[in-house]
Image (spheres, rainbow, N blue to C red):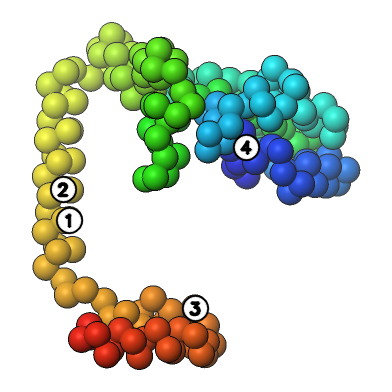
């Protein structure tokens, strides 16, 4: 299984991978997480097709679009796709249609720069966690109190993990490059010397 975002479908790697998979019938399931924006560029500005899954046909793959905010639909389609390719079927491309509620990065400002607020609120109402929770409660598989107990337990585990992490001393700056290079590049050595001179322990 290989995953990419909607923006990734505009790259050479995406098309090369699908072409290779189609020619050699590799046992692959490709999943596009279409969250509507490649950083700040809407999917409608990246491609002329309405559904990204239609790109599969050009490479001899099966393509399918699914509600990416529906856990059960995603499970059903993914299970089908995996079974097909494991049994010798052609590779399959799945487009999971979803939405990125939050910013792309910590410096991003989608609410005021490039996304209308009503669009965000529309997708917020389709939140997959809320939907599966409502489904489980409606089916009697879980209750509101069950979810409250789970949330409390998770909060406690997170608090304990934070305490454990904060109790450990900070790593030495040199740990940034340990197991990264066979030798430390000269420019990083200079930076480590500057850090040592500034009083920060190595």
- Tag 4 residue: 7
Observer-nearest residue: 199 or 22? 199
The C terminus: image quadrant: bottom left
Task: Where is residue 36? Give x, y as percent.
Answer: 55, 26
Task: Where is residue 30? Give x, y as percent.
Answer: 66, 38
Q: Find the distance from the CA under tag 2 to the CA under tag 3.
A: 31 Å
Q: Find the distance from the CA under tag 3 to the CA under tag 1.
A: 27 Å
Question: Does residue 124 show up?
Answer: yes
Question: Which is more foreground, mark 2 or mark 3?
Answer: 3
- Relative vertical location of residue 6 with respect to residue 127 in this rendering, above or below: below
- Tag 2 residue: 157
Q: Are marks 1 and 2 in contact (CB under 8 Å)?
A: yes
Give the label on residue 180, or none: 3
Q: Are marks 1 and 4 in contact (CB under 8 Å)?
A: no
Question: Does residue 74 show up?
Answer: no
Q: Are marks 4 and 2 in contact (CB under 8 Å)?
A: no
- Relative vertical location of residue 139 with respect to residue 171 in this rendering, above or below: above
Q: In terms of sequence position, does the residue under pointer 1 or pointer 4 come before the other?
A: 4
User: Residue pushed farthest right?
Assistant: 23
Report whether 159 appears left or right of 137. left
């Amino acid at each position: 299984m290989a995953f990419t975002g909607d923006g990734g479908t505009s790259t050479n790697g995406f098309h090369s991978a699908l072409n290779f998979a189609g020619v050699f019938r590799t046992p692959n399931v490709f999943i596009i997480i279409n969250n509507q924006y490649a950083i700040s560029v809407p999917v409608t500005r990246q491609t002329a097709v309405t559904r990204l899954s239609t790109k599969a046909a050009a490479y001899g793959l099966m393509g399918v679009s699914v509600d990416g905010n529906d856990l059960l639909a995603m499970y059903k389609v993914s299970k089908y796709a995996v079974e097909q390719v494991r049994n010798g079927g052609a590779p399959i491309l799945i487009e999971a249609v979803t939405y990125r509620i939050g910013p792309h990065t910590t410096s991003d400002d989608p609410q005021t720069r490039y996304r209308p607020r009503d669009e965000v609120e529309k997708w917020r109402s389709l939140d997959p966690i809320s939907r599966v929770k409502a489904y489980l409660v409606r089916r009697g598989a879980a209750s509101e109190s069950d979810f409250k107990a789970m949330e409390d337990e998770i909060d406690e585990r997170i608090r304990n993990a934070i305490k454990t992490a904060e109790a450990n001393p900070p790593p030495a700056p040199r740990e940034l490059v340990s197991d990264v290079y066979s030798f430390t590049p000269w420019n990083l050595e200079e930076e480590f010397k500057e850090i040592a001179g500034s009083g920060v322990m190595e």
